Image: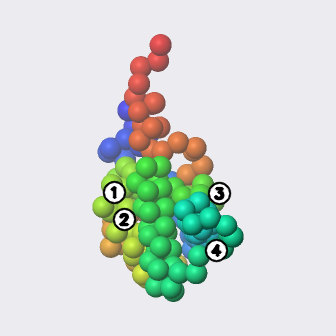
Amino acid sequence: MNGDAMSPGVPWQARGRPAGLVSRLVAGAIDALVVAVLGVLLHLGASALVLVVTGPPFRTLDPPAWVTAVCGTAIALGYAAGSWATTGRTAGGQVMGLRVSARSGQLLGAAPATLRAALCLALPAGLLWIPLSRRNASVQDLLVRSTVVYDWTPRSPAVSAYRRSAPNP
């Protein structure tokens, strides 16, 4: 690589401008909507499966509140962690031009992405640290050693780095 922002020697600050609180809140709201839609689709799919097994009439399931909470949490964790570990962005991050990565600029691994997702669900008020931080880091970012930057490139850092280092035919 030629000294660009994704080179290993370039500090994490040069990989993009740190994202602010409002952009991250809007992205989070979009992601909450996506998770809600996924939950509704899962609920309807389970109800349709019951219809196939038991026959008519169609009725939506009425699970206990704890089952709904566990399923919603699992959907949110899987959605955020999977998105951050594979592309560095969720649907909300894509809309707002945000990318989550390790401070090195590389994608978060599965374990840090899952931990970050769990912290975001358990401690949403951790975002309030962003305006007080010199690098716009939330409490979750500090604990996981991640960063959220503005990045409007459509590809993940790993794909972009690979394409830059590949020989041109």
Res 41 → quadrant: bottom right
Residue at 53% across / 42% down in the picture?
155
Does the CB distance between marks 1 and 2 fall below 8 Å? yes
Question: Mark 4 falls on what kind of element?
Answer: loop
Residue picked out by circle 1 = 110
Residue assigned mark 2? 114
**Image quadrant assignment for residue 23:** bottom right
The crowding category of the residue bearing disc 4, from other C-alpha atoms within 10 Å (few below 14, some 14 to 19, many at least 20), is some
Looking at this view, is 148 or 117 the one in front?
Answer: 117
Do the residues bearing badges 4 and 1 touch, measured as CB atoms within 8 Å? no
Q: CA distance from mark 3 to mark 2?
A: 22 Å
Picture quadrant of residue 167: top left
The quarter in which the N terminus is drawn is top left
| Distance between the alpha carbons at the discs numbered 1 and 2 | 6 Å
**Colour approach in the figure:** rainbow
- The image position of residue 74, as x and y in percent, is 44, 70
Distance of mark 4 from mark 2, alpha carbons? 31 Å
Which residue has dot 4 on it? 60
Tell me the amino acid under the disc marked 1.
Ala
Badge 3 crowding class, 10 Å Cα cut-off, few under 14, some 14 to 19, many 20 or more, is some
Amino acid tagged 4? Thr
Give the crowd class for mark 1: few <14, some 14-19, many >=20 residues within 10 Å. some
Question: At label 2, which amino acid type do we have?
Answer: Thr
* Extreme-right residue of the structure: 57
Q: Tell me the CA gap for discs 3 and 1.
A: 23 Å
159 lies left or right of 152: left
Find numbered disc 3 in the image and state the secondary structure of the residue it sits on: helix
